[in-house]
Image (cartoon, rainbow, N blue to C red):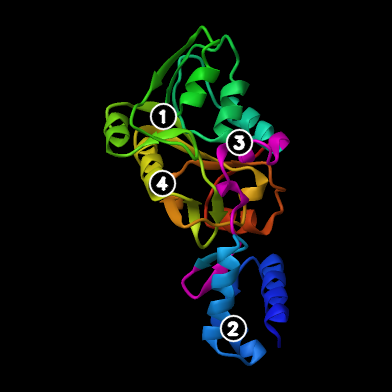
Amino acid sequence: MLAAERRDHLLGLLAREGKIVAKGVAADLGISEDSVRRDLRDLAAEGLCQRVYGGALPASPAVADFGTRQTVTPDGKRRVAATAAALLRPGSALILDGGTTALALAHALPSDLACTVITHSPTIAVALVDHPQAEVFLLGGRLFKHSVVTCGAAAVEAAQNVSADLCFLGVTGVHPDAGLTTGDAEEAAMKRALAARAADTYILASSEKIGAASPFRVLPWADISGLITDAAPDHPVLDRLSAHGVEILTAD
């Protein structure tokens, strides 16, 4: 089989089954595992898959820069945001992560809602300037320009001195095997620090992130209260998560 044919076969397998097991592909095609791994390295370099131990998973399209991500499934993000906003009660204190879905949630908050919003995103803080009843606490630190959020030791230390009723986190990948993932190690650490300061943590995940994976794990499933997504309720990934006890909140 030619290299181009192997490439098409691998991409088709990834689309159909949501993962590639290098050993199984090598046996099916009668080639070495080293050949499969080289093909996967090439695909990963093009952003077409996320390599994991033993094979590969679909790469998340949500690892692009902030401006590009704003154009990806905006309607789905608005639906996810509306479902998340319905969980809030007057007087709530919430931790709001950065990212485009979190920004949609900031826009979805009723302008007269009395609440406290703690965020490490300057973009979120600015979006809430016109909410007179919302107290906004902006956590400082090194600005991670890719996602327009603060990260690093100073930001983590600041997070350790706050607490909230709810935390809403964004991720770039939601996969039954890889878990909840994102594309940067420091950003993943910051998300863990934020989640640790809330009574309940919900994951905001528009449909393009379901079944995808990124390099760095954020949280184990046991540490979240629910997953809010606009993906179809019968999505096979959601079925697997539900079977493992993850509460799925479907955005209308």
Q: Residues within 10 Å of mark 4 (few under 14, many from 20)?
A: many
Q: Residues within 10 Å of mark 1 (few under 14, many from 20)?
A: many
If you read the primary sequence from the N terminus, does the residue marked by circle 2 or circle 4 appear first? 2
Mark 1 vs mark 2, CA separation in Å: 43 Å
- Which residue range is magenta in the image? 52-75
Indicate which disc residue 188 carries.
Answer: 4
Q: Give the amino acid type for the residue marked by disc 1 in the picture.
A: His
Q: Which residue in the structure is indicated by mark 2?
A: 24
Mark 3 vs mark 4, CA separation in Å: 20 Å
- Please, what secondary structure does the residue beneath circle 4 have? helix
- Please, what secondary structure does the residue beneath circle 1 have? loop
Indicate which disc residue 67 carries.
Answer: 3
If you read the primary sequence from the N terminus, does the residue marked by circle 1 or circle 2 appear first? 2
Residue beneath the point at 49% across and 51% down: 180
22 up-or-down from 72: above or below: below
If you read the primary sequence from the N terminus, does the residue marked by circle 3 or circle 1 appear first? 3
Coordinates of residue 144 in the picture (x, y in percent):
42, 38
79 up-or-down from 4: above or below: above
Mark 3 vs mark 2, CA separation in Å: 39 Å
Q: Give the amino acid type for the residue marked by disc 4 in the picture.
A: Ala
Q: Residues within 10 Å of mark 2 (few under 14, many from 20)?
A: some
Spot the residue most to the bottom: 30
